[in-house]
Image: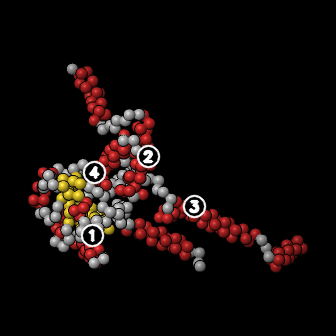
């Protein structure tokens, strides 16, 4: 009796697997495209997550839509365009390069350049006193001469 | 400039940027639909399923499409303001991913000021309009072009300072 109970409990998780909605595809390539697209499209409700990682209602709807379009034979570009037309560039984790995203794409490089410039000026300023002016050199020489004479 | 001032300046710049960051509302994603004709749809009406509501019904005068659902708690909060708005401009409803009986009961309880309501059982129309949360409200000009989208609850202030001025401005256009 106890064994039977343990066996039953062990098999219980399989029910959960069976309950997850699956998206049937004709070919493994379609399945792969579905996985890739699900990872590229952002869920607008839970904004840090891709639609493939989210169980929000909207993400489920968007996955269904991606599935439908793949099965109907639409290209990846067509599917991405469909989502962008509705939800804007925000739906893409990798936004396109255009006037409103220049800061996003090139800002880090500009900041890095500023950092390099600051670093160079600091280093140069630090080194500057090593060079003595002629007057200082003369004075140093004089001090050293006095030292030797003593 | 005195050296000691540099950390203070860096702090102030950071504080300003963080302050701006706090005032942004990242959950309001700008809609690419603004300035585009309303997406075509044809849906059964909520109360008379044998009749349909299409995007053409919204044309002819400045109108409003309010996306709501009976399961949406913030919709209750904005409902009195939507009803007040409906006294001044035709407000159409898009009943989003809802059970028909639930929303009919909800409207009986809270009042129905909508001119007509499209029933979007599976959220397909919502997706075409770029709806990602309820409530959402679209303002359309007389040609049926989407001119504004309000995301989230409408309250007295957004009604007075945002929605009504836009409606007045659209009415003044080309009249």
Look at discs 3 and 2 and give the one toward the viewer: 2
> What residue sits right under mark 1 in the picture?
B142
Task: Check if mark 1 and mark 2 are on a common chain.
Answer: no
Residue A111 lies in what quarter of the image? bottom right
> What residue sits right under mark 3 in the picture?
A109
Chain bearing mark 1: B
B67 vs A18: above or below: below
A45 vs A100: above or below: above
> What residue sits right under mark 4 in the picture?
B124
Look at discs 3 and 1 and give the one toward the viewer: 1
Task: Check if mark 4 and mark 1 are on a common chain.
Answer: yes
Task: Give SS at disc 2.
Answer: helix
- Sort mark 1 into few (<14), some (14-19) or many (20+) by Cα contacts within 10 Å: some
**Count of marks placed on residues:** 4
B65 vs B158: above or below: above
Contact between marks 4 and 1 (CB within 8 A): the answer is no
- Sort mark 2 into few (<14), some (14-19) or many (20+) by Cα contacts within 10 Å: some
Q: Residue at x 36, y 41 (%)?
A: A72
Residue A70 lies in what quarter of the image? top left
> What residue sits right under mark 2 in the picture?
A76
Task: Give SS at disc 4.
Answer: helix
Left or right of B155 in this view: A32: right
Which quarter shows the C terminus of chain A? Answer: bottom right
Marks 3 and 1, how far apart at CA:
46 Å
Task: Give SS at disc 1.
Answer: loop
Q: Is residue A27 visible?
A: yes
């Amino acid at each position: 009796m106890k064994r039977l109970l343990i066996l039953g409990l062990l098999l219980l998780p399989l029910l959960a697997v069976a309950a997850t909605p699956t998206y049937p595809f004709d070919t493994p390539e379609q399945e792969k495209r579905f996985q890739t697209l699900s990872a590229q499209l952002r869920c607008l409700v839970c904004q840090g997550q891709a639609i493939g990682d989210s169980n929000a209602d909207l993400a489920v709807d968007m996955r269904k839509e991606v599935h439908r379009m793949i099965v109907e034979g639409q290209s990846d570009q067509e599917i991405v365009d469909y989502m962008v037309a509705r939800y804007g560039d925000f739906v893409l984790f990798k936004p396109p390069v255009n006037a409103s995203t220049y800061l996003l794409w090139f800002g880090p490089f500009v900041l890095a350049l500023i950092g390099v410039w600051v670093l160079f000026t600091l280093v140069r300023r630090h080194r500057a006193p090593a060079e003595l002016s002629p007057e200082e050199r003369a004075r140093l020489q004089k001090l050293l001469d006095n030292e030797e004479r003593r | 400039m005195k050296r000691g001032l540099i950390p203070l300046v860096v702090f102030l710049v950071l504080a300003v940027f963080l302050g701006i960051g706090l005032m942004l509302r990242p959950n309001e994603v700008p809609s690419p639909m603004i300035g585009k004709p309303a997406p075509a749809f044809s849906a059964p009406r909520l109360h008379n399923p044998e009749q349909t509501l299409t995007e053409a019904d919204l044309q002819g005068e400045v109108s409003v499409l309010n996306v709501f659902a009976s399961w949406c708690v913030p919709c209750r909060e904005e409902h009195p303001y939507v009803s007040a708005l409906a006294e001044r401009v035709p407000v159409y409803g898009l009943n989003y991913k809802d059970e028909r009986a639930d929303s009919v009961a909800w409207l009986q309880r809270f009042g129905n000021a909508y001119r007509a309501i499209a029933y979007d059982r599976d959220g397909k129309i919502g997706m075409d309009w770029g709806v990602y949360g309820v409530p959402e409200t679209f303002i359309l000009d007389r040609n049926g072009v989407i001119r504004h989208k309000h995301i989230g609850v409408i309250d007295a202030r957004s009604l007075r300072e945002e929605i009504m001025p836009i409606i007045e401005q659209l009415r003044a256009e080309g009249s």
